[in-house]
Image: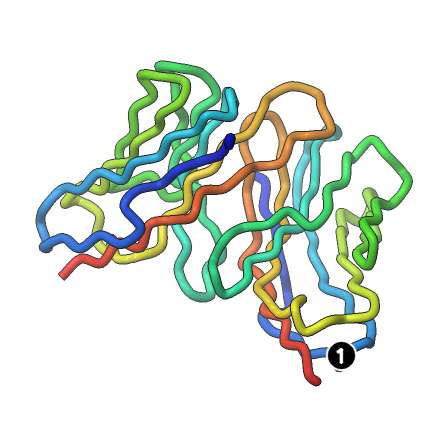
Amino acid sequence: DGGITQSPKYLFRKEGQNVTLSCEQNLNHDAMYWYRQDPGQGLRLIYYSQIVNDFQKGDIAEGYSVSREKKESFPLTVTSAQKNPTAFYLCASSILGDSQNTEAFFGQGTRLTVV
Amino acid sequence: AQTVTQSQPEMSVQEAETVTLSCTYDTSESDYYLFWYKQPPSRQMILVIRQEAYKQQNATENRFSVNFQKAAKSFSLKISDSQLGDAAMYFCAYRSGGKIIFGKGTRLHILP
């Protein structure tokens, strides 16, 4: 079955440690996204990528880093510079170009708790 | 910069009644897409309906329809014959090019 896989579902880390969230898709989508969800804040865009080896900052990129070495994979690293990393993180992918099917498809999310 | 605003943090509707969720957006682009997503307690994001900006006709999907007013930059979602399973967070989203941004969401409660 095609889809987006985020792992792990729950992640605990100590303050000051970097942590990497995994996101893999087998939908052959060009674009991939990372969002952060906090209560009352909706989904805020962290980073997005439209092509391998290229990515753009979203609205809240500070304290995060990404890579896009393969079309299928878009890992997100939450660094120690992120002041309040505890949140629910959602990865998504979509096709590009003029098409009716331009919506984002989402993974199940990763709940990160920093203690 | 583009923005998406949902002015109703929470709404309630009686089962079988109709409810309308509001969304406005700000953009200088002429070609874009708009979406409504539903997020139930499982937190899985589910596409409800999409609208292409170049289409004047409002999109419909069964009990869900939109009122797209391009000049006013408004994109409201109407849910008819509300069901208990419609209870969820609803997010309005805007896409132009490769970027997709979301509003803060509206939590919809269905009263039996």
Q: Residue at x 60, y 65 (%)?
A: B106
Residue visible at 57% across and 63% down in the picture: B89
Secondary structure under the numbered disc 1 in the rendered image = loop
> Which part of the image, by quadrant, shows the C terminus of chain B?
bottom right
Question: Is the residue marked by circle 1 packed among few (<14), some (14-19), or many (20+) residues within 10 Å?
Answer: some
Residue at 73%, 29% in the rendered image: A100
Q: Quadrant of residue A7?
A: top left
Residue A72 shown left or right of residue A16 in the figure: right
Residue B96: percent from left, percent from top: 63, 31
Q: Hey, which residue is sitting farthest right in the picture?
A: B57
**Quadrant in which the N terminus of chain B appears:** top right
Q: Amino acid at mark 1?
A: Glu
The residue wearing badge 1 is B15
Q: Chain of mark 1?
A: B
Seen in the picture, residue B96 relative to A84 is either above or below; the reply is above
Q: Nearest the camera: B103 or B46?
A: B46
Q: Residue at x 9, y 49 (%)?
A: A16
Locate residue B73, reporting x and y percent.
76, 47
Nearer to the camera, B40 or B56? B40
* In this rendering, position of residue B32 left or right of residue A58: right
Marks counted in the figure total 1
Image coordinates for residue B34, horizontal then vertical, percent: 70, 42
Viewer-proximal residue among B44 and B20: B44
Q: Give the colouring mode of the picture.
A: rainbow
Residue at the outermost front position: A1
Q: Nearer the viewer, residue A111 or B9?
A: A111
Task: Give how far across and how far down residue A14 sits, in percent.
Answer: 9, 55
